[in-house]
């Protein structure tokens, strides 16, 4: 039996496109998803679609082909990987004001974005001393891995990017800005915003970190650590193989080895980041939840599992 036949296929995709009838798509995707036994999360907004789904390879192809029948998404190109783990336990179709929340309605990647840089050219760019390299992801993502020498904006959500850019980036300095994120979607918006605000040379890693880890060999890599992802694998490494990072159920923070070794770590309940502030009622609830998950695994039953950070 092949490895692929015993594993789950995970497909990550997004596309900025004018989609004023996005709320009508919710029912369609739910119907197609149920028919093809698709699990995962898909976000719809007037600016397009953003999703990560799992299922069999054939089921995912059938599902995505339904979306591609609309001319706006005919070139939808997913990033597909395999994992022995269960990555989702249900299908959620969400409608929101944005497919990735920046909070600035004036920004539209459909109008202009920065210059794409292929993974094979990324190392050369970020090694240029005249280039300012910025990780546009959030603090908990940066905590488990980033590119050598990259700047950490110390944001808790992508909504904070605007304030960070206003306070720390100046178009008058004529700096070259190179940005990266997990799959490329946040950089589409961040680069578009910088262009709107007078920046001339803005670059971003095409396909994001995932594309880089897929195409650049580990021995040629400028990446350090693991890459946080928004499904139950938690992280991936070079070759898009499953990482070893675990997530705290109490606060959703990625756990380092020292966290797991801490006396404040309790599996499925708390870690050093939240142990002292976790209310006893929540602690008891998490302990019971962890017990139910263990029982479900022992009986080979599914459980909703942890919720990933938004």
Image: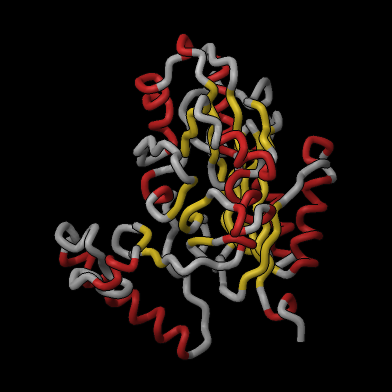
In the image shown, does 28 or 298 lie closer to the viewer? Answer: 298
In the figure, residue 200 lies in which quadrant? top right
Judged left or right of residue 148, residue 35 is right
Q: Residue at x 38, y 64 (%)?
A: 247
**Position of residue 263 in the picture relative to residue 290 (left or right):** left
x and y percent of residue 36 in the render? Answer: 74, 65
In the rendered image, residue 145, in percent from the top left (x then y), is placed at 45, 53
Towards the viewer: 52 or 118: 118
Q: Residue furthest top?
A: 172
Left or right: 276 in relation to 34: left
User: Which residue lies most toward the bottom here?
Assistant: 299
Q: Against 271, is 161 above or below?
A: above
In this view of the protein, which residue sits in the foreground, 119 or 222? 222
The relative height of residue 310 versus residue 175 in the rendered view (above or below) is below
Q: Quick check: 178 above or below 91?
A: above
Q: In this view, does 37 lie to the left or right of 270?
A: right
Residue 277: give x, y in percent of width and height.
Answer: 16, 57
Question: Can the viewer see residue 50 in this picture?
Answer: yes
Give the total number of marks visible in the rendering. 0
- In the picture, the quarter occupied by the N terminus is bottom right
Q: Which residue is drawn at 85% across and 45% down?
A: 69
Residue 93, can we see it?
no
Query: x, y percentage for residue 10?
Result: 65, 62
Q: Which of 43 and 247 is in front in this view?
A: 247
Point 74% across, 57% down: residue: 32
């Amino acid at each position: 039996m092949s490895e692929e036949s015993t594993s789950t296929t995970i497909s990550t995709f997004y596309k900025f496109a004018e989609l004023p009838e996005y709320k009508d798509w919710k029912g369609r995707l739910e119907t197609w998803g149920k028919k093809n036994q698709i699990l995962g999360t898909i976000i719809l907004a007037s600016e397009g679609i953003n999703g990560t789904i799992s299922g069999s390879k054939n089921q995912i192809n059938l599902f995505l082909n339904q979306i591609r029948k609309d001319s706006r998404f005919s070139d939808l190109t997913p990033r597909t990987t395999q994992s022995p783990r269960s990555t989702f336990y249900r299908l959620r179709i969400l409608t929101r004001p944005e497919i990735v929340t920046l909070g600035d309605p004036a920004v539209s990647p459909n109008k202009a974005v920065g210059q794409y840089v292929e993974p094979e050219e990324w190392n050369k760019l970020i090694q240029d001393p005249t280039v300012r390299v910025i990780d546009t992801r959030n603090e908990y993502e940066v905590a488990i891995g980033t590119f050598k020498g990259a700047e950490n904006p110390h944001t808790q959500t992508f909504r904070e990017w605007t304030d960070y850019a206003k306070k720390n980036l100046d178009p008058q300095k004529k700096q070259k800005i190179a940005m990266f994120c997990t799959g490329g979607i946040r950089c589409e918006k961040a680069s578009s915003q910088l262009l709107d605000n007078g920046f001339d040379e803005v670059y971003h890693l095409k396909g994001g970190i995932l594309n880089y880890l897929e195409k650049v060999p580990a021995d040629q890599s400028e990446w350090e650590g693991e890459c946080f992802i928004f499904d139950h694998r938690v992280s991936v490494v070079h070759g898009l193989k499953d990482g070893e990072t675990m997530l705290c159920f109490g606060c959703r923070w990625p756990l380092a080895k020292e966290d797991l070794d801490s006396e404040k770590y309790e599996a499925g309940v708390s870690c050093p980041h939240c142990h002292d502030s976790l209310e006893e009622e929540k602690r008891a609830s998490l302990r019971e939840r962890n017990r139910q998950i263990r029982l479900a695994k022992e009986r080979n039953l599914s459980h909703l599992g942890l919720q990933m950070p938004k």
